[in-house]
């Protein structure tokens, strides 16, 4: 190919001109190839950016699915010692020594929670957390700091004994108005002989009252059910709030013929006296001076004969057959069916299950008009999780009820509803006190019964669900025990709870079928706790949601004491009288969803996530629990804490939360980097670009040779 002509007489100059033309043409060719390579790289860059987005999304999904879960740690932070000589047997606590559970609340309205408890020497005490020790090597658990302490003026009984505090409550006597309002609480304590004491926030005795005199029957009767609540509502204008207290007694012996009756007491009077004690009696007391505003005692409101069908609808339970009478002005429960269903599930097994609450009851034909006339409350219904009192000023749960008109009582008789202003019985929903749970588990409009080990011939390893209406029939039987073939023994279900469904069932198919879509009717989960520390979650059809093992067990200790009953019977007696395994629903954050459960075993305490069945935290115990667990935020960090009562005294466990976001970010970065490097190494564009670079290098070498 001729790129130049011979000009001039000097061959050298001609050659020079030809070489220059060759270089210019080669530069044009190289420029075109460079532009093509840049265009190819630009296309590869666009393709790389699109792949990069895909990789980021993929890494984000992987990081979310396999993210590091939050970590919770329980740490003992304080203790309060109890001397054994305060116990009745001077060795270990029994049921007779049990005191009201501690209360974690803000008495003074200053935003700092205090611990209120009654010590074994009957002193009302306010506790504060000890200062943090700077010495990390000091493993001694510090004692709690006593802020206030006062001796209860408990009267001595005629037989030389002393009254025992049974229930304690705190509350506000001034209604909630605004966020700038500062309210202080009062403390009310009731004893087993109907003495009531009221204290101010600074432990000043405001008043004391004796509601009934039962000194002459103290040896033949014992307290069965009792509770007290405080409300800011008034019967009279100058009441400054109300204290509502209710309770009943039971025979210390089952044979009523052994009851001691004086010579001048007729059988008719003895029966009347027995009814006045075993009847669940209620009182409304002015919070200002302790004067009685109304009481609900046997015969106060009279009774009228009524057929069983009118009272209980189509109920045919044993309790319905026993009582055929209504109080004057009392209505059948089916007229308030929708309101009663709001207070289910109902469960009563011992004194701690007695609860007094406020409510607003209207008959079904009056409910629509009542909803239109209700006033707005100063309290917002929503709460912010992790903040004291949900980000609002201190308040109680009953203060969220707008214009309450009734008192709802959970006791051994079922549900009793009284008029808030007069004590007039509004209605009653009788339920047996057999330790079963009563609720409408399948939303068919009828109450169902969930029990375990209560039927004759049935093992405690089975949970039975019964439909009581219109015909009693068994709906489901759940096997909650797991057999260990190595030891040929099984754990038995100690307790069971019914709570709203919060468990998460995984699976893409369930999402495609719409199982996770919100519905108006929320089903229930059945939670069982076994002596082996095993916690299981079932739905109402008997399907297992999850099952997890915890260290909060007591099966080995139980078997050892039963095996050694002949040689060391005192160990079994102490085990039966003192040991009290318990569980408590809780929210990890203050005012959060109650999606966790804390439980205590023989020598351990554990917290389980009720959504996925994970063991969140656990810790060992130096002594065996003897009372129910108490949940509250005593260190004011936004997380709930736990108080354990045992033979040695009280132990406070603080809950700490770690997010583990750093581990998730490191894991996501490593996964992203690995995918990015592998995709770059395996990309076809990388292979072809390497070939083009090799071809261009070879062309340059050939041109240089030319």
Image (spheres, rainbow, N blue to C red):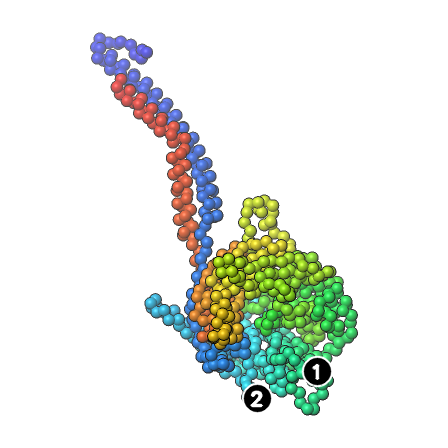
Of the pair 506 and 19, the residue shown nearer to us: 506
* Position in image of residue 670 (x %, y %): 39, 45
* Position in image of residue 521 (x %, y %): 64, 55
Q: Quadrant of residue 471?
A: bottom right
Q: Quadrant of the N terminus?
A: top left
Label 1 residue SS: helix
Residue lying at 60% horizontally and 78% vertically, measured from the top left: 223
Label 2 residue SS: loop
- Which residue lies under the disc numbered 1? 271
Q: Is residue 108 visible?
A: no
Residue lying at 67% horizontally and 71% vertically, measured from the top left: 413
* Position in image of residue 287 (x %, y %): 60, 78
First reached walking from the N terminus: tag 1 or tag 2: 2
Disc 2 crowd, CA 10 A, few/some/many (<14, 14-19, 20+): few
Image position of 524 with respect to 189: above or below:
above
Measure the C-alpha gap from mark 1 to mark 2: 24 Å
Residue lying at 23% horizontally and 13% vertically, measured from the top left: 13
Q: Quadrant of the C terminus?
A: top left
- Which residue lies under the disc numbered 2? 159
Disc 1 crowd, CA 10 A, few/some/many (<14, 14-19, 20+): few
Image position of 269 with respect to 13: above or below:
below
């Amino acid at each position: 190919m001729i790129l130049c002509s011979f000009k001039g007489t000097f061959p050298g100059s001609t050659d020079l001109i030809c070489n220059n033309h060759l270089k210019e043409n080669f530069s044009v060719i190289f420029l075109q190839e460079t532009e093509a390579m840049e265009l190819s790289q630009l296309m590869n860059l666009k393709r790389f950016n699109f792949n990069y987005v895909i990789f980021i999304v993929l890494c984000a999904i992987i990081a979310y699915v396999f993210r590091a879960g939050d970590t919770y740690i329980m740490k003992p932070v304080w203790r309060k010692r109890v001397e054994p000589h305060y116990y009745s047997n001077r060795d270990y606590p029994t049921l007779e020594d049990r005191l009201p559970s501690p209360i974690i609340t803000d008495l003074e309205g200053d935003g700092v929670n205090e611990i209120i408890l009654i010590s074994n020497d009957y002193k009302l005490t306010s506790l504060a957390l000890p200062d943090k020790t700077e010495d990390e090597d000091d493993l001694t658990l510090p004692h709690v700091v006593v802020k206030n302490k006062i001796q209860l003026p408990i009267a001595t009984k005629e037989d030389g004994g002393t009254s025992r505090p049974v229930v304690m409550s705190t509350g506000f006597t001034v209604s909630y108005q605004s966020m700038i309002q500062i309210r202080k609480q009062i403390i009310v304590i009731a004893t087993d002989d109907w003495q009531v004491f009221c204290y101010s926030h600074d432990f000043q005795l405001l008043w004391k009252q004796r509601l009934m005199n039962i000194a002459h029957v103290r040896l033949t009767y014992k307290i069965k059910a009792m509770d007290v609540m405080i409300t800011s509502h008034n019967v009279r204008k100058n009441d400054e709030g109300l204290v509502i207290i209710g309770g009943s007694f039971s025979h210390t012996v089952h044979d009523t013929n052994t009851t001691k009756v004086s010579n001048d007491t007729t059988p008719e009077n003895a029966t009347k006296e027995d009814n006045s004690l075993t009847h669940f009696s209620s009182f409304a007391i002015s919070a200002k001076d302790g004067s009685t505003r109304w009481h609900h005692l046997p015969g106060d409101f009279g009774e009228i004969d009524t057929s069983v069908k009118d009272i209980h609808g189509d109920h045919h339970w044993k309790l319905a057959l026993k009582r055929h009478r209504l109080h004057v002005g009392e209505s059948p429960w089916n007229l308030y069916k929708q309101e009663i269903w709001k207070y289910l599930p109902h469960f009563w097994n011992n004194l701690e299950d007695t609860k007094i609450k406020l409510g607003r009851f209207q008959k079904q034909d009056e409910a629509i008009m009542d909803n239109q006339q209700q006033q707005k409350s100063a309290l917002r219904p929503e709460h912010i999780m992790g903040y004291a009192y949900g980000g609002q000023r201190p308040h109680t749960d009953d203060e969220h009820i707008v214009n309450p008109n009734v008192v709802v009582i959970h006791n051994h008789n079922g549900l009793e509803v009284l008029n808030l202003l007069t004590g007039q019985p509004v209605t009653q929903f009788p339920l047996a006190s057999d330790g079963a749970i009563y609720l409408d588990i399948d939303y068919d409009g009828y109450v169902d019964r969930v029990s375990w080990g209560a039927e004759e011939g049935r093992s405690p390893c089975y949970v039975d669900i019964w439909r009581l209406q219109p015909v009693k029939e068994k709906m489901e039987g759940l096997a909650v025990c797991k057999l260990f073939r190595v030891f040929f023994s099984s754990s038995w279900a100690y307790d069971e709870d019914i709570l709203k469904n919060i468990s998460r069932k995984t699976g893409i198919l369930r999402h495609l079928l719409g199982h996770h879509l919100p519905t108006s009717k929320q089903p229930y989960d059945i939670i069982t706790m076994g002596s082996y520390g095993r916690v299981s979650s079932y739905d109402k059809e008997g399907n297992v949601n999850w099952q997890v093992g915890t260290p909060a067990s007591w099966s080995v200790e139980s078997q050892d004491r039963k095996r050694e009953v002949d040689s060391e019977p005192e160990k079994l007696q102490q085990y039966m009288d003192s040991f009290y395994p318990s569980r408590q629903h809780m929210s990890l954050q203050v005012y959060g969803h109650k999606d966790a459960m804390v439980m205590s075993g023989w020598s351990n305490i554990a917290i389980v996530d009720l959504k996925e069945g994970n063991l969140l935290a656990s810790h060992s115990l130096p002594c065996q629990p003897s009372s129910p667990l108490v949940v509250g935020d005593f260190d004011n960090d936004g997380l709930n804490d736990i108080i354990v009562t045992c033979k040695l005294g009280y132990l406070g466990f603080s809950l700490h939360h770690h997010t583990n976001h750093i581990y998730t970010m490191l894991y996501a970065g490593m996964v992203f980097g690995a995918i990015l490097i592998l995709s770059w190494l395996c990309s076809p564009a990388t292979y072809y670009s390497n070939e083009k670079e090799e071809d261009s290098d070879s062309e340059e070498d050939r041109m240089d040779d030319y």
